[in-house]
Image (cartoon, grey):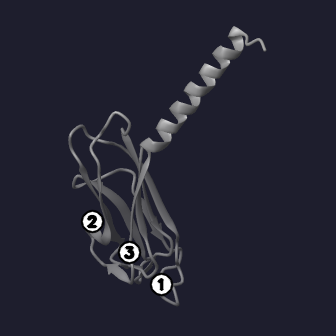
Amino acid sequence: MKTSLKSIALAIWFTTVVAMASSQAFATSIIHVETAGNQSTNSSNWTPIQNLSLTLPARTSQSRHALLILNLPNPYATGPNYPGGQVGISVGGSVLVPIAVFTTNIAQPSPPNAGRTPTTLVIKVDLLNNNTQAVSAVWMNVRGSTVIIDTPASLTAIVE
């Protein structure tokens, strides 16, 4: 049986690609938190959403970024003036841009929870050398309304 130099080179290349792909697969981690029960806010300032906080690890040679995903599947707002809410992600105490906003297209929805609007916000952040970072989901009202979640909401970080 005769093995050509081309076959050996192809085998080495294939083994290297598989090894690199395997090491990349182990570099990714997922950090996930979620709420339980009802929560609401009528604050006109950014306020943390209870139980939606996590800590990002420090940067390593294999982990440089995190994709943050805030998901509120069924939020709604009540109030007399096109009620709505704003949600954001705070990293290290600063609310990042962009934010997500939902409002109803009815001045005063009836029933009060008629304007449920699934809301998801995705932001990529850089990990810091030698420092972890505190991440929190935050929310506030629109035009004096009360923002309500009564289904589980989640905050997820995919670290790569």
The percent position of residue 130, horizontal first and vertical second, equals 21, 40
Instruction: Please state which of residues 57 and 66 is positioned toward the viewer in this rendering.
Output: 57
Q: Residue furthest top?
A: 5
Location of residue 42 by image quarter: bottom left
Instruction: Please state which of residues 81 and 73 is positioned toward the viewer in this rendering.
Output: 73
Q: Looking at the rendered structure, which numbered label has been put on residue 108? A: 1
Q: CA distance from mark 3 to mark 1?
A: 28 Å
Residue occupying image coordinates x 73% and y 13%: 3
In this rendering, the label closer to the viewer, 2 or 1: 2
Q: CA distance from mark 2 to mark 3?
A: 18 Å
The percent position of residue 4, horizontal first and vertical second, equals 73, 10
Note whether 10 is above or below 59 in the view shown. above
Looking at the rendering, in which quadrant would you find the N terminus? top right
Residue occupying image coordinates x 50% and y 42%: 25
The percent position of residue 131, horizontal first and vertical second, equals 21, 44
SS under mark 1: loop
